[in-house]
Image (cartoon, rainbow, N blue to C red):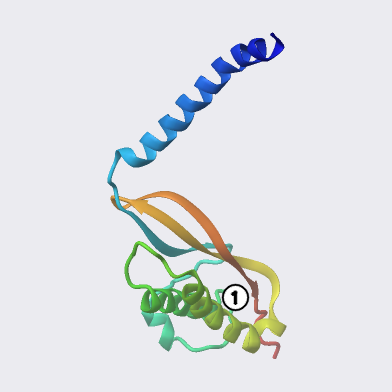
Amino acid sequence: MNKKRLLLMLQPLFISLLMIGSACVLQSCGDDEEVLIDYYLNVSSKESLGVTSEDESQGTMGQPNSNVLANTIWKMKKALRDIYPEATIQGNDVEVMYCVDKVYSDYKAMYGQLERNTICVVKLFRVKKVDGIIRSSTTLQTYHFGAIPPAQE
């Protein structure tokens, strides 16, 4: 008798779980929308940065509004677009992180010892897009850039 009573008590719970599971499956299969993977860099800086291809020719000496920093961020964005020019179904986290990390590592090797106080944070995001709209994002890497003090004369 105890078993029958237990089964009768669990029956509504089982039916509820079954309905929730069905709703989840139907929702995920309901639309045949294609999910694409894309990547982007988000730049948060305390200093004004002109991040364009023209920064390439502005020199590499550290100034208060460091052209070195702007140039490096431009190179990171270019490397990202060169390795991953358009959104795809599968994405390529390893290659994307490698190419952006390489630019950052080169910068740190040359200027890391000169930096003081973080003035800029760049985050590499992996995003899922449906119909060109970002539906979710994940931070893959965070890069910190410090100020390079002006040369003492």
| Residue 114, quarter of the rendered image | bottom right
Q: Is residue 2 left or right of residue 55?
A: right
Residue under the point 57% across and 19% down: 13
In-front residue for pair 111/132: 132
Q: How many marks?
A: 1
Residue under the point 72% across and 84% down: 113
Residue under the point 45% across and 86% down: 58
**Does residue 142 lie above or below 102 as drawn?**
above
Q: Which image quarter is the C terminus in?
A: bottom right
Q: Position of residue 16 (x, y in %)?
A: 51, 21
Residue under the point 56% across and 16% down: 11
Q: Is residue 27 left or right of residue 95?
A: left
**Is residue 120 in view?**
yes
In-front residue for pair 120/47: 120
| Residue 143, quarter of the rendered image | bottom right
Q: Which image quarter is the N terminus in?
A: top right
**Does residue 140 lie above or below 146 as drawn?**
above
Q: Secondary structure at mark 1?
A: loop
Q: Position of residue 120 (x, y in %)?
A: 59, 67
Q: Which residue is mark 1?
A: 64
Q: Amino acid at mark 1?
A: Pro
